[in-house]
Amino acid sequence: MESSHSIIEALLRKIKDEMFSSVDLYSFVSPSAYDTAWLAMVPGGNDGRPMFGECLNWVVNNQREGGFWGESDGYGNPTIDCLPATLACMLALKTWGVGSGNLERGLAFIHDNTEKLLAENHGRCPRWFAIVLPAMIELAQKTGLEIVFSDELEEVLTNIFHHRQRILEREELVDKYHYPPLLSYLETLPLWYGIDEEDIVKHLSEDGSMFQSPSATVCAFITTRNRKCMNYLQALVQRFPHGVPSMYPMDEQLIQLIMVDHLQKLGLADHFHKEIENILEHVYSHYMSQEQLPQQSLVPVQIYRDALAFRLLRMHGYHVSPWSFCWFLNHQDILTHMEEDCEYFSSVMYNVYRATDLTFSGEYELQEARSFARKLLKKTLSLGIRGDNVAMFPNFHALIENELDLPWMARLDHLDHRMCIEQLCEINTQWTGKASFYRLSCFHNDVLMQLAVKNYEFRQAIYKSELEELKRWCEDWGLSNMGFGREKTTYCYFAVAVACSFLPHDSEVRMIVAKSGILIIVADDFFDTKGSLNELESLTEAVRRWNGKDLSSHSKTIFAALDNLVSGMAAKHLHQQGNDITGDLQDIWYETFASWLLETKWSKSGYIPSKHEYLDNARISVATQTMVLPASCFLNPGSPECKLKHFQNGSITKLLMVVARLLNDTQSYQKEQEEGKLNFVLLHLKENPKATIEDSISFTKAILDEKRKELLEHALMDDLDDLPKPCKQLHLSCFKVFQMCYNSSNRFDSNTELLHDINRAIYIPLKVQTSKPLKLLPYHARPKKENSKISSTCFDQTYKPRVKPSFIMHRIPPKIRDGCGKVPISLNLKLCFV
């Protein structure tokens, strides 16, 4: 374990030097094969050489092992975005007559995988794909690349071409309903679309780019020879000599936010506390001072950034308004476009949905945003793109399903970290670009992933060791085989350890909470099922006097273990901080035993309290305060001795007690009804004879939902309680454990429901996927079919504009279609480069 800790420390030093020193944030931005290929095709003048030779070199040297260019999934396999990227790179090579081996491997990939990739997408054709792929196929065939498709695939491609035609006929060059606008796809628009230099120049940005798109700016430069375009491209290549990104410039604060989010998802945030706080402080000072207004072409990016900033800032205690990202709800045109193109916005809506996890009381705009995001995410998943049959990032869809099926408040962080490590690919997927997903390249950093794996394994080793120690303690004090009730040593430790992920210095806190939980379960079961009224009264009186000399049997065992726990805590606190908290600890435990005794007397006498009287006692008997408040004394900083009793009546502690009880009661009412026990759901039903059990459950859940939001606000916001932040985080962790156990069933009382999660959290080693590049047949080994190219009856190739013998593109004619209604070819780059 010591060697693992040393390895983790060494990896941390290395990563901090790489990620958080004074490095250029753009060094984390992944290069785009598609856009780099377009820059590689720009000629340098009359010398017959490319203007950006370094881009051409990048294309030659960055073909994947499987023969494709572009991003792969986390296992090294291509996705549909690799099809246009690979065709663009092959065009660049063909333009300059280089890389014959690359071309052969690229053709083999296209022939062997196009049908498979399109079939995996279940016929779905995202807008960006329908615009880009046909243009790349047309240009490839026009430049002499012998692309061969089967008859079955030709039909699929015909549908994609028709989809493009519908898009081009329906949309304006730049309108408020489509993001990014058609003009940002300038390099792919067919000649008949009717774009002239005036259209292009009018929409150039101040920096000379066409909607921040390198590939579109290449075409804008070819068309207009605009000097600002040239300056933009030159600056771009100077900044990114090893492959240009899909978008430039990018929001540097967004890059930082994504880095923070990534570290949290991998379970590494505790190691980068200072760095994360510095980033969020900087983001907060700038982010909240800027007016949040939608910009037409960047709406997806802006919503993504705003939602991510809201989540991270609120999670770290900053006061941020929901309208900082819910502004899109006031723009019906944006909402309409999102619904029409939900796949394009899937990663955006995923982050909106995650942001709404942190809803406080009265924030109805967040509830509206959550409902809208959930609707769109479910629609995305329903479009035949499920499980392993997802062409674009299957594990990203698995993350969406996990998010929708199980709320964040009911998930334990440690298991979330495992999922993200094992499905390493899609957690760094950002938003859909023109021909790919935007990503940050540092997320493929082997060192970062190595750290995440080592960190998780280190936690597992500690958890196994602590659990064995806990089992020995239970055996030593006779709690393992009481002969009645529930034996929940492993369950208790699992819930505590996985929820309270402070490492390594808070091992003591975990053990205190786990031992307290075990004692609570044993004692509660003794009161419920085994002890006689005399025994229970004697035990409760012994706890009040803190003297168990007259006890026997189970009562004696319970008190002895309790005395060992309390005296051990008091001795440690006295040694560490010089304060004796024995009396406060004993008082908290006595109050808990007294509440159990009262419930027993009610049950045995047949007394039925009002639901409010019941809840006043039941929030104590659930014993969350008995677990978290004593443990809080050992956090750094912890709750001061003189205020331990005061904190018992604090807002966040009271809220935790209430929500834990109501969560338990919503899932255990059937069992308790059969056993003749009291329950809030059943008491409300008794007080409202006309109500149904469903009405009573709904009433209880409505109270629970409101209290949950209040608890979350108290846990995250520093100015609502005088408890130190680590103590409030412990309260939140305890609540998440109860939410996990009682979210949709009573998992805690089941002997099997938690076993899988326990094994994954503590025992089963990580299963980190490795790359599995496709093994392709050599191109010459593939049989060629007769008449297997895309038919000219589908894509008319008779329209050939006259091109001036110069680099300047001629004025493109107005939008037309030929008399047969066929779609002419796209711009022939090679002719333009004469």
Image (tube, rainbow, N blue to C red):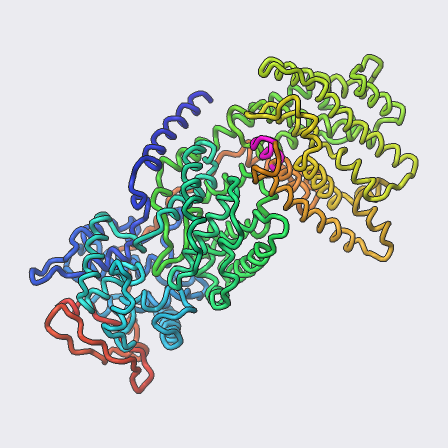
| Residue 78 place in picture, x, y as percent | 36, 53
- In terms of secondary structure, what is the magenta stretch mainly? helix
| Residue 49 place in picture, x, y as percent | 11, 58
Residue at 30% across, 82% down: 817
Residue at 80% across, 14% down: 547
Which range of residues does the magenta coloring cover? 723-732
Asked if the magenta segment contains residue 334, the reply would be no
Does residue 322 sit above or below 753 in this rendering?
Answer: below
Question: Is 436 left or right of 643, judged from the image as shown?
Answer: left
Asked if the magenta segment contains residue 726, the reply would be yes
Question: Is 601 left or right of 83, judged from the image as shown?
Answer: right
Which quadrant of the figure contains the C terminus? bottom left
Does residue 191 sit above or below 427 in this rendering?
Answer: below
Question: Is 61 left or right of 541, judged from the image as shown?
Answer: left
| Residue 12 place in picture, x, y as percent | 38, 30
Does residue 79 sit above or below 625 in this rendering?
Answer: below
Q: Quadrant of residue 196?
A: bottom left
Q: Is residue 522 visible?
A: yes
Identify the residue at the far right of this view: 605
Q: Quadrant of residue 644?
A: top right
Q: How many marks?
A: 0
Residue at 48% across, 30% down: 457
Q: Is residue 350 visible?
A: no
Residue at 74% across, 23% down: 481
Identify the residue at the far left of this view: 47
